[in-house]
Amino acid sequence: MTESTPAAPPDRLPVYRILTGPDDAAFCHRVSEALALGYRLYGSPAATFNGTTVIVAQALIWPCMESAVAP
């Protein structure tokens, strides 16, 4: 966590989030917005195909959680 990153996420958001949705620009914007807020990527993205669309998922954590989940 840097000095400019608050100890807790804004707007009472959780410290751990997983974003899911179709693999499109809107999903990429949602992940980008979370990163701009201060979240960090946690793990690799996941993808599946539902027969029509590729669905993706990306976990995010707030920086204060990095030491709690470090290997």
Image: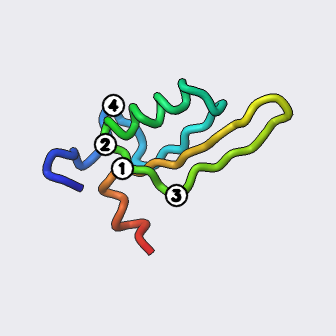
Q: Return the residue found at the far bottom.
A: 71
Front of the two marks 3 and 4:
3
Amino acid tagged 3:
Gly
Mark 1 to mark 4 CA distance (whole Å): 13 Å
Mark 2 to mark 4 CA distance (whole Å): 13 Å
Location of residue 21 in the rendering, given as x and y in whole percent from the top left corner: 63, 32
Numbered badge on residue 11? 4
Mark 2 to mark 1 CA distance (whole Å): 7 Å
Numbered badge on residue 28? none
The number of discs equals: 4
State yes or no: discs 1 and 4 in contact (Cβ < 8 Å): no
Mark 2 to mark 3 CA distance (whole Å): 16 Å
- Determine which residue is flagged by label 3: 43
Location of residue 11 in the rendering, given as x and y in whole percent from the top left corner: 33, 31
Which colour assignment does the render follow?
Answer: rainbow
Q: Nearer the viewer, residue 30 or 11?
A: 30
